[in-house]
Amino acid sequence: MRGIAMVLLAAMTAFAADDAWTKVRELKSGTELRIFKKGGLHPIIAKMEEANPDSLIIVVKTEELAIPREQIDRVDYRPVRGPRVTKETRESGPGTDAVAAAEPPTNAPGESVSTTTSLVLGGQPDFQTVYRRPPPEAKK
């Protein structure tokens, strides 16, 4: 009975690894990746070229590299970002600003409203993990 459980566990682990690698293969070319290799000190930041069942093909600066799948511990990707620039408009006037409310009223005949419009540059979204190498199979 224990042998059957070990075989089932190994099959489920292999299926989970293939399923996670399928997600890597579904990423679009040009997607920004962060790849952690076995024994590597620093991750590799690159652009996705393609992934096949045995390796990941990436572009680092102007060089194309192929990394064998068994050398990869983890792959993170940066999701497509939303609009880079957003517009913010703020209005202030009597009753809308705490500082303006504390000041004595001026001799102006009517109320005045100030409108400020600014453009905000959006940052990049954080990386999200798409693949982790499964733990090694238990030895008998």
Image: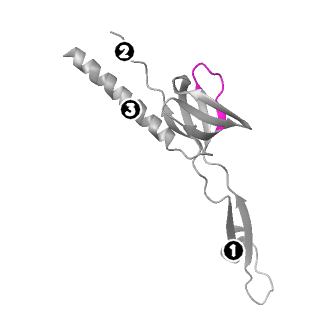
Q: CA distance from mark 1 to mark 2?
A: 65 Å
* Image quadrant where one finds the C terminus: top left
- Name the residue tied to disc 2: 138
Give the class, few, some or many, for how many residues have Cα within 10 Å of label 2's Cα (few <14, many ≥20): few
Give the class, few, some or many, for how many residues have Cα within 10 Å of label 3's Cα (few <14, many ≥20): some
**Magenta stretch: includes residue 91:** no
Give the class, few, some or many, for how many residues have Cα within 10 Å of label 1's Cα (few <14, many ≥20): few
- Say which residue appears at 18% left-offset and 16% top-offset: 1
Q: Earlier in the sequence, mark 1 or mark 2?
A: 1
| Amino acid on which the number 2 mark rests in the picture | Ala
Judge depth for marks 1 and 2 and give the one in front. Answer: 2
Majority secondary structure of magenta residues: loop
Tell me residue 29's x, y (percent).
Answer: 59, 45
Pick out the residue farthest to the left.
1
Judge depth for marks 3 and 1 and give the one in front. Answer: 3
Tell me residue 108's x, y (percent).
Answer: 80, 86
Q: Earlier in the sequence, mark 3 or mark 1?
A: 3
**Magenta stretch: includes residue 38:** yes
- Say which residue appears at 42% left-offset and 30% top-offset: 17
User: Quarter-wise, where is residue 64 in the image?
Assistant: top right
- In the displayed structure, 19 sits above or below 91; it is above
- Name the residue tied to disc 1: 91
**In this image, 31 relative to 85: left or right?**
left
Extent of the magenta region: 37-46
- Say which residue appears at 22% left-offset and 15% top-offset: 2
Q: Viewer-proximal residue, 140 or 63?
A: 63
- Name the residue tied to disc 3: 16
| Amino acid on which the number 3 mark rests in the picture | Ala
Secondary structure, mark 2, is: loop
| Amino acid on which the number 1 mark rests in the picture | Glu
